[in-house]
Amino acid sequence: MFKKHRTKAIPPPVLQNGHEALDNNNVVSNKNPPVSPVTNSLQFYCQLAHGSPTAFVSGFSNVKELYDKIGEAFDMPASDIIFCTLNTFKPDMKKLLGGQIGLEDFIFAHRKGRPKEVELQKTEDSLGLTITDNGAGYSFIKRIKEGSVISNIPHIKVGDHIEKLNDVNMVGKRHFEVATALKTIPLGSTFTIRLVEPMASGFGQIAPKNSTRAPKKAGYGSGKETLRFKAGGKAEIQEQDDAMDSGIEKINGVLESFMGINDSELATQIWEMSEGKLNSMEFAEAIDDSDLAAFEFTDELIIELWGCVTDARQARLK
């Protein structure tokens, strides 16, 4: 209906802007990457989720750069970071750092912990996993469907980084590549999955005190403003937009249903593609003319995504 050859729902392993992410902190670096003038003037508190002193991060414009600077602040390789959460040290998948950070948010970095290997048999077409990635080369489990094959295996948990499938390295692959690799495992076959779990928290039940939250910066408004990471890698301070936030969340839900992935950056880019579009045909054309064409979204998926946009615009989402 929209495009003659749009047939697939699972994309090829190519996406030009797939690795866009965050940047800098207050630690002096030997490198001199370009620094966003917006984020260079902001500072965010950061801790390692398993326990650490507090550091400041600033000057970043994408996630990968944020991880680099967190690594510098805590004298560790940035590649040790599986994911970050906002305002909680717990591996709460609802608090994942995605396409935006509130100006007063506290960042917790979850570091690699114990590796583990699990051998299992694929007895159903769907394993019940939702995969996301950290924007810097690590895919991990965001959700495990209740009653699924995986839900009955206690050693596989939400937050685990998927490092290998049958000795094939998954590091550096996007979430949709990992999801595709899992889908293509033949039904009835036995395979091995190597996982790395995040380090267990040493905070116990103690959350950061209010006094540790970053003080409000003069000139940045009410605290409802957020630092958003645009698809082109630029970071911008914007007022909170409830329609956008609800639309992106709904788009993410559709991506999970159709593709088994969760990606706030991709969902944000899809939302941006809808800006100024009056109908699904214009929306589909905008996607086909962008790097999102690599995903070869089906007509059915395009219609579902456009429905998310119109529902959010008309405040039908809660």
Image (tube, rainbow, N blue to C red):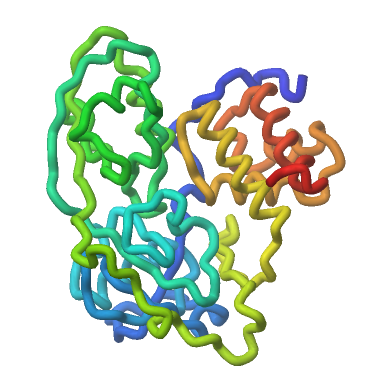
Whether 306 is drawn above or below 184: the answer is: below
| Quadrant of the rendered image containing residue 296 | top right
Q: How many marks?
A: 0
Q: Position of residue 295 (x, y in %)?
A: 55, 32
User: Residue shown at 48%/48% (left/top)?
Assistant: 18
Q: Is residue 8 left or right of residue 54?
A: right
User: Residue shown at 49%/45% (left/top)?
Assistant: 263
User: Residue shown at 62%/40% (left/top)?
Assistant: 251
Q: Is residue 77 visible?
A: no
Whether 48 is drawn above or below 242: the answer is: below
Q: Nearer the viewer, residue 41 or 304?
A: 304
Q: Which part of the image, by quadrant, shows the N terminus?
A: top right
Q: Most extreme residue toward the front, as rendered?
A: 205
Whether 197 is drawn above or below 169: the answer is: below
Q: Is residue 285 left or right of residue 254?
A: right
Q: Is residue 75 left or right of residue 310?
A: left
Q: Position of residue 71 (x, y in %)?
A: 26, 70
